Amino acid sequence: MATPNPEDPKAEPIQPAEKPESIPIPRNSKVERFSRFNRVLHVLMILSFISLALTGMTLKFSYTGWAGFLARFFGGYESAGYIHRVAAVVMFGIFFAHMYDLTKRKREEFGTWKALLFGPHTMLFTKRDLQEFIASVKWFLHKGPRPQYGRWTYWEKFDYFAVFWGVFVIGSTGLMLWFSEFFTLFIPGWFINVATIIHSDEALLAVGFIFTVHFFNTHLRPEKFPMDMVIFTGYQSVEELKEDKPREYEELVKSGRLQQLVVEQHPPVVIKTMKAFGWTALAVGFSIVLLIIYAMVFAYR
Amino acid sequence: MTTSDEHGRPQQPFALSIRAARYFLAFVFASLPHLVQAQENSDCLTCHQDKSLTAARGSKTVSLFVDETKFTASMHGSLTCVTCHADLSGKEMPHETPLQKVECGTCHDAEQQLHAESLHGKAIARNDPLAPRCQSCHGSHEIKPVKDAASAVAPLKVPFLCGRCHQEGTRVQRERDIPQHQILENYSESIHGEGLLRRGLVVAPNCATCHTPHRILPHTDSRSSIARKNIAATCSKCHALIESVHLKVIRGELWEKKEHVLPACVDCHQPHKIRKVFYTQGMADKDCLRCHERSDLVSSKDGRSMVVNASELAHSKHLKTSCSQCHSGVNISRRRPCETLVQKVDCSTCHAEVGQQYQKSTHGQLVMNNDPNGPTCKECHGTHAVKGKVDPNSPTFPTRIPNLCARCHREGQKAAMRYTGTQHDIIEHYTESIHGKGLLKSGLTVTATCTDCHTAHGVLPRTNPASSVNPKNVPATCGRCHHGIQEQFMQSIHATMAGKSEKDLPVCNDCHTAHTIRRADVEGFKLDIMTKCGRCHQKIAETYFDTYHGKVSQLGYTKTAKCYDCHGAHDILPVSDARSHLSHDNVVSTCQKCHPGASRRFAGYLTHATHHDPEKYPWLFWTFWGMTGLLLTTFVFGGIHTLLWLPRALEIRRQKKKANKADGHTEP
């Protein structure tokens, strides 16, 4: 999960005395992009999302052989359902933790919701995102230069709100299915059937999108290959920042805050662990996509 | 008995002489017409030889024609008409009508006397219109001697003569109190009837032999020939030495069934049903064993051992049955009485009912068609050592039956090889089935074995409507043990619609299988039931798998609602039936079995819904296609974006690599 603006819009104005160029920052020194809290949330998100995807797809594609295998792997259907619900609770927990984080940072860093939501590093879509999207397409087609992306690109914002949407749609229908006896006190029984379709198809969308488009956009782009580790380490090199987010880099250099963001690197064993975790998550994610494709193409009914 | 017998029996000399005297007198009267004022027969025949001469008798018209030739050839041919029609004696011709009834007793007074005492005579006395008179049996103008085969009362004709009234469907049998049934049929199949009617032995007893011709009395009448105290005498008229035969065969035992009541012949040999006499006079087991105990005794034909183990016999069910009872047909007068044996042992001589079942069965049919594979009695029951099925050592004891049948019905054996149906490895499957485990592992002798379902002697293929495993009969067959289930099932739609629907409705084995039958609470059964129901209810089973219950059941979850959890198992009824588990009044409590908080709205969940049917489930259909549209749009958009990006990203990668090389940079 991405985070809203970690920058402080009320930062002191650029001091002419401290010319950014005068501060020597080595090309490969690391600057922070994600706070520890957000990185932990993303790891939890990976764990709960994959658990939900595996157990949920097992049920959705119960007519396939692999579904039976997975159900047994999870210790039977009952236990798979239990894992699904626990992971759902974790997902809700992440959602609320993020909400709590936002209010906390609004209080401590921004002061007002307006500053948080409509500042230069907002997560909301702006006119500039539309311009950058158009410019990007032009760039793809060799019809223009690569846009000078800022702190958050439009595809990162899309992913961010996709989670909001997903938690709302899948979460609400999931609760209806979980507590169907309670919900049918207000809603008709057949709506449980409708909720089932919404829940499972929206989940299919989320799983399909995250494990393909999101993987490519943020972790697996050829220039980042084999893996962009920033979401686990929390930092990236100055050079990478300059390439990926030139506008943000410029701003940081101008404001002279780049130096403040320089962080220590993690010890190699930590990096290795993170890589292993990342690879595992990627592998599982891709496998799920393959299984879904298999189920939909070869065993669909 | 004092009656003179007209039917081929030796007559008592005294009775004969009386009769001869009567005939003589009648002859004298007839040949001396000038001595008496009587009319010539020709006077009568003047009118009565006219075939068209008729008279009204009540509502009927009867012919008054008398055939002169037949009359002259008859027993009474030498008599004048007025000898019998005595009221016409000395009357002017043509005479007035009606005439009085002919009194045969004028000459045959002894017979008349006996007849008057009999049931028939008493019936005449009370004007019973069904009562037989002399001429009912003997005829009128054409009476022939009893020894004449053309006589109406010739031995061969007697059963049919009596049978005119004494057979099923006649007024006598229907309207009068006749304690015996199927008299003529049973008689004709009895040894007596067979002797008389099939072999033409006129000495074989007919009706009149036992019942007497004229003095027919009920067995409750102590004067009757068939009264309990007289029956032995009646039978002994022919079976003169029967008592000594019985003594020999039954080894001098008392024949009492009830205390101090000696049995009469008919207690064992039912009247009209007397079957073969299997007792050979003077033949005792020890006579047989004289040879058959010798261990070196072999058949001269094929060299097989002919030794009989006497102790085997002594421990068998037949310990009180003598050799010659089964090996019937020995001739005691031969040095080797058994050399006259031609027939194989026929168990149905005693076990008649079982024998009849067997003959209709597949086993019996095979044997009847001389198929060498057909099992006879001894194949299952053994020979001299035959034991009852309650004896644990008997091959027909329940725990041994599967192995007994397996000798032919195991895969590769002779019966299995000629079998073309769908049931295979039946012995192995049965052994693993709940019935097999109950019998062989738990040792429950009440568990269903082969014979409980297929019957022991009436084994027939399921396609035969008379078979116990024919679909029509399966509920009753299973219901012999599972009666409570059968009662439920017979109320269900599957049973009540049987015969009314053109489809084959399921019976027990369609869901439970025949030989692989399992407990209904094991996982395999629970998960199989959807495919079982789905064989007929295909659509509804498919849509079941589209919804939650179906999906989790496919993952091996047995606690979820399966067909019978909602619809009921044996008591399944259409939803429209108020007694159905899914009727409006019952559906909520049915859901509550698993979902305790279920409400009426909860029960509105569509358990067989599909999103492929816009007519029936428009909400689901449009939700599904709405979601699919959203998915496709997102994936197409994301996909195109990514694919467009990819070449650019690769370009950047190449540039970076170049730059790194130029810098001597190794870090990616």
Image (cartoon, grey):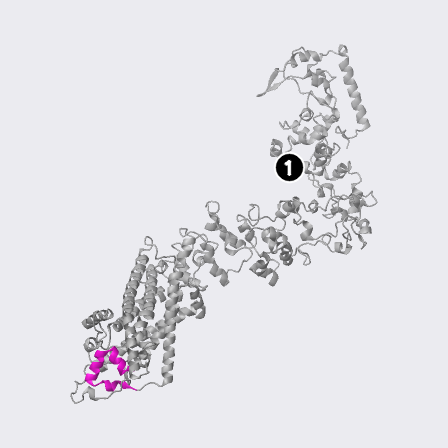
The answer to whether B23 is drawn above or below residue B335 in the figure is above
**Left or right of residue B493, residue B336 in this image:** right
Tell me the crowding category of disc 1: few under 14, some 14 to 19, or many 20 or more residues within 10 angstroms, Cα based.
Answer: some
- Residue B491 position, x and y percent, is 48, 50
**Would residue B551 be visible to someone looking at this image?**
yes
Picture quarter with the N terminus of chain B = top right
Q: Secondary structure at mark 1?
A: loop
The answer to whether A114 is drawn above or below residue A184 in the figure is below
Which span of residues is magenta-colored?
A: A235-263
Picture quarter with the C terminus of chain B = bottom left
**Left or right of residue B405, residue A54 in this image:** left
**Would residue A184 be visible to someone looking at this image?**
no
Residue B146: in magenta span: no
Which residue appears at 72% of the width and 12% of the height? B38
Toward the front, the furthest residue is B662
- Residue B420 position, x and y percent, is 57, 50
Quarter residue B359 falls in = top right
Amino acid tagged 1: Gln
Identify which residue, B22 or B367, lies in the foreground: B367
The answer to whether B447 is drawn above or below residue B337 in the figure is below
- Residue B490 position, x and y percent, is 49, 50
- Main secondary structure found in the magenta portion: helix
Toward the left, the furthest residue is A16
Which residue appears at 81% of the width and 43% of the height? B332
Q: Mark 1 = which residue?
A: B182
Quarter residue A191 falls in = bottom left
Toward the right, the furthest residue is B335
**Left or right of residue A162, residue B47 in this image:** right
